[in-house]
Image (cartoon, rainbow, N blue to C red):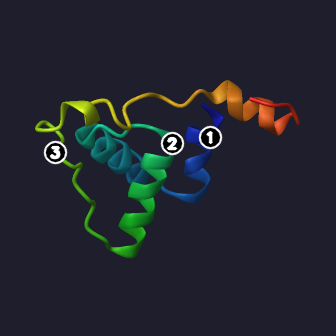
């Protein structure tokens, strides 16, 4: 949660809100997805649209699972995930 709030150190509230809104619309609401949208807006890039995988059932869940943050915490503490 702190990382999300920390975005406001670098970006305005309006920029963060817009990035979250765009991420919600594209189904990519995670920290790196929001950062990507912020970075794209700074560069004036048009956001990419998600790939339509409806014709590929094996790919339907690709990129949908949330990250297990406990694994990252373990790495930061010098342990193994």
Left or right: 51 in relation to 65: left
Question: Which image quadrant is residue 78 in?
Answer: top right
Q: Foreground residue, 50 or 3?
A: 50
> Residue beneath label 2, please?
31
Image location (x, y in percent) of residue 51:
21, 49
Crowd tier of the residue under label 3, counting other residues whose Cα lies within 10 Å: few below 14, some 14–19, many 20 or above? few
Q: Are marks 2 and 1 in contact (CB under 8 Å)?
A: yes
Residue at the location (55% across, 39% down)? 4
Mark 3 or mark 1, whichever is nearer to me: 3
Crowd tier of the residue under label 2, counting other residues whose Cα lies within 10 Å: few below 14, some 14–19, many 20 or above? some
Label 3 sits on a secondary structure element that is loop
Which comes before the other along the chain, label 2 or label 1?
1
Label 1 sits on a secondary structure element that is helix
Residue at the location (59% across, 27% down)? 68
Mark 2 or mark 1, whichever is nearer to me: 2
Label 2 sits on a secondary structure element that is helix
List the single residue furthest toward the bottom. 43
Which comes before the other along the chain, label 3 or label 2?
2
Left or right: 67 in relation to 56: right
Q: Foreground residue, 21 or 66?
A: 66
- Which quadrant: the C terminus? top right
> Residue beneath label 3, please?
52
How far, Cα to Cα, is label 3 from label 2?
Answer: 22 Å
Mark 3 or mark 2, whichever is nearer to me: 3
Image location (x, y in percent) of residue 29:
39, 37
Residue at the location (33% across, 49% down)? 18
Compared to residue 79, the image places residue 42 above or below, namely below
How far, Cα to Cα, is label 2 from label 1?
Answer: 8 Å
Compared to residue 61, the image places residue 21 above or below, namely below
Crowd tier of the residue under label 1, counting other residues whose Cα lies within 10 Å: few below 14, some 14–19, many 20 or above? few
List the single residue furthest toward the left. 55
> Residue beneath label 1, please?
3
């Amino acid at each position: 949660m702190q990382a999300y709030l920390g975005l406001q150190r670098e970006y305005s509230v309006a920029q963060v809100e817009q990035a979250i809104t765009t991420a919600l619309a594209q189904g990519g609401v995670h920290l790196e997805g929001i950062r990507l949208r912020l970075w794209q807006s700074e560069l004036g890039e048009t956001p990419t649209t998600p790939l339509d995988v409806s014709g590929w059932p094996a790919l339907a869940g690709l990129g949908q699972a949330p990250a297990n943050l406990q694994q990252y915490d373990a790495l930061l503490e010098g342990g193994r995930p």
